[in-house]
Image (tube, helix red, strand yellow):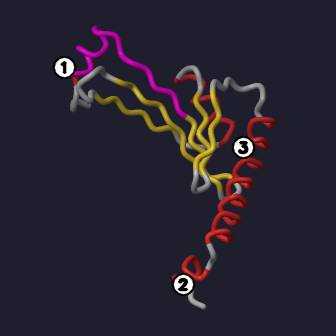
Amino acid sequence: MSATNTAAAQSPLEMIAADERALRRTGEVARELVTQHADLPLKEARLRYGGEIRLNVPTAEDVRAWAARLDADITEHTNDPGHGTYQHTDVDTVIDGIRVHVWHCRILSEAEAAAWRENRGRS
């Protein structure tokens, strides 16, 4: 049987069982991660379908602390979708085949947003 026909060959109950196993594995990695790094700030931990752990932390500095601990790179970006100017600080890494996303987002003050808009695109 080819890999492309595997899902089609599964019954709905087999599909559910496979999804349950995948989510269980994601939960195991999440519990281990949170337990091993219990000293790091954490506001919320969520599991996502498809093998992803999302960790929301209180501040951008907390994202940096997680990044240092996980030996992962940080990305930062600011955007204004029209209802506020948001500053995002994120870390994406993979642990035991599971994507781990550590993030913080904050709304800039009016003064910060004005400065960001004025300097947007400048190095």
Magenta stretch: includes residue 104: yes
Tell me which residue sits at (42%, 33%) in the image: 76
Q: Which numbered tag is attached to residue 82?
A: none
Amino acid at dot 3: Ala
- Front of the two marks 2 and 1: 2
Residue 76 vertical position relative to residue 20 in the rendered view, above or below: above
Depicted 28 relative to depicted 69: above or below:
below
Q: Secondary structure at mark 2?
A: helix
Is 54 a magenta residue? no
Marks 2 and 3, Cα distance to the nearest angstrom? Answer: 31 Å
Q: Which residues are magenta?
A: 103-118
Q: Nearer the viewer, mark 3 or mark 1?
A: 3
Of all residues shown, which one is farthest toward the left?
Answer: 118
Instruction: Please give the label number shown on residue 5.
Output: 2
Location of the C terminus (image quadrant): top left
Residue at which label 3 appears: 30
**Residue, disc 1:** 118
Dot 1: element: helix
Foreground residue among 87 and 82: 82
Tell me the CA gap for discs 2 and 1: 54 Å
